[in-house]
Amino acid sequence: MSRVPKTRKEMPLTPLSFPTVGSMGKTGTWRTFRPEVDYSKCTRCTLCWIYCPDAAIIRQADDSPKIDYDYCKGCGICANECPVKAITMCREEEE
Amino acid sequence: MKTVVKQEMLALNGDEAVAYAAKQPDVDVVAAYPVTPQTIIVEKFSEYVANGEVETEFVCTESEHSAMTACLTASVTGARTFTATSAPGLALMHEMLFVTSGCRAPVVMAVANRALSAPLNIHCDHSDTMAERDSGWIQLYAENAQEAYDLIIQGFKIAESQEVLLPVMVGLDGFTLTHTLENVQVLSDEVVRKFVGSHQIPKVVTHEGKIVPFKLDPDNPMSMGPIALPNYYFEFKRQQEEAMRNALKRISQVNEEFEVISGRRYGNGLLELYQVEDADVAIVCLGSTTGTVRTVVDELREEGVKAGVLKIRAFRPLPVEGIVEALKKVKAVAVMDRSMSFGGGGGAVFHEVRHALYDLTPHPNVVNYIYGLGGRDTSPTQIRQIFEDLQRMIQAKRVGELVRYVGLRG
């Protein structure tokens, strides 16, 4: 939050929130396994994009997937659904 | 100074008058669910939509909870929004009433006052709106169809004022007003549009320091009223109270501005005094009953009794100072309540009027008369008896029973 109101006068009429990346917390930090896409195997079928329950896969102009690591929780559904095994789940490196 | 415009005289019942008023100031969205005795408002308005008389988006919802939700969400996109309901519908809206006022959405709603079940009853009393008096809505009560028409128009102007931005509820007595034909003077659409003006939207500063309109807008995305925990919730509620204080002034101003175009004025907009100035005995009431009391006051004045009536037009915000000023010289006051606060020792209006007078020394004797529940008729004879009770109270120098019932089987 960039402005912390000190008095009522500084506050808006009702609580407001504006969309910013991770304003409600980046759920990507929950991940244990991260999906990695092998674009040479990917057939652009978009199944991973369809199945992603968190809308954390962005469908790019050429229909290839781009994983949004700020929100991907690493559930692995995309890797499981991929018919050509172009997505592999890799353990996150421990810090 | 007076620039009263030419008006048309129409024969309308209260519901039709409300629908007519709602059609005039370019309302963008109406989301409503029909319920007796409000039904005619929704029927009439859907006719206007079907006939192309308005460009309003009319949303038929599956319940009143949804109707109020649709109104709230339409309103926060900057749309001028109207709805109407009655007792069970208002009760179903309960949750969303608070969300609407908390989001500071200036929705205008007509409420055809009706009794709450059980037992099932479709007739007039004020149990429905009195139960919502703490919902953060401005509450205005109409005495007749004309005032209902005028209040809806004024309601938009009050609700949308930048210093107010609160939703407005206009109460009109079920059947007594909603279904009774009266002569109603209506202004032209153009005059009403000009009077209400365009819907001005305040500005807010975003997290990036950008100044954007306070509305849901894809170009400037924001969430409204998402969450405020113990750290900020309290302040937002206190701001609503401030808006109510501002509404006191605004209601009076709008009442005066309305007089300039229509020639009609209702006291100071908050209270309407009739023969109260030198009265010994006075009745405080709201809604259509005021008309009956006026008639009795006229009769009593002819007989030399100094009687008066104080009509509360704005119950939220309650004009406490005005009530004190009006009643400070009156010896005995009867407050009439058309609803009950079970176990509370009197009705809501009684509690608040009596509370307002507490600091006066000496203060008038104030008693409560519960009347007309479930649409029971209150006759001039009964009103006269109340005034006689008050006179006896003064002579006997004894108050007696604090809460009394009018026209009730013993």
Image (spheres, helix red, strand yellow):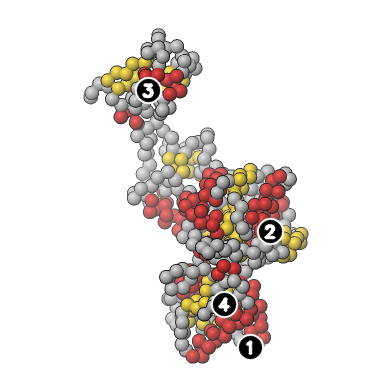
Residue at 42% x, 48% y: name it.
A11
The residue pinned by badge 3 equals A77
Q: Secondary structure at mark 2?
A: helix
Q: Amino acid at mark 3?
A: Ile
Question: Do discs 4 and 1 share a chain?
Answer: yes
| Dot placed on the residue nearer the N-terminal end, 1 or 2 | 2
The residue pinned by badge 1 equals B304
Given the image, what chain letter belongs to the residue carrying mark 2?
A: B
Query: Does residue B209 sit above or below B166 in this rendering?
Result: above
Residue at 35% x, 48% y: name it.
B229
| Residue B203 placement (x, y as % from top left) | 51, 44
Q: Name, please, the residue furthest toward the top.
A: A40
Q: Amino acid at mark 4?
A: Gly
- Tell which of B245 and B342 is nearer to you: B342
The residue pinned by badge 2 equals B17
Given the image, what chain letter belongs to the residue carrying mark 4?
A: B
Q: Name, please, the residue furthest toward the bottom.
A: B396
Observer-side mark, 1 or 3, equals 3
Instruction: Quote the CA–CA distance across marks 4 and 3.
Output: 72 Å
The residue pinned by badge 4 equals B407
Q: Secondary structure at mark 4?
A: loop
Question: Do discs 1 and 2 share a chain?
Answer: yes
Q: Is residue B191 visible?
A: yes
Observer-side mark, 1 or 2, equals 2
Q: Secondary structure at mark 1?
A: loop
Observer-side mark, 2 or 4, equals 4
| Residue B273 placement (x, y as % from top left) | 59, 74
Categorize mark 2 by other alpha carbons within 10 Å: few (<14), some (14-19), many (20+). Answer: many
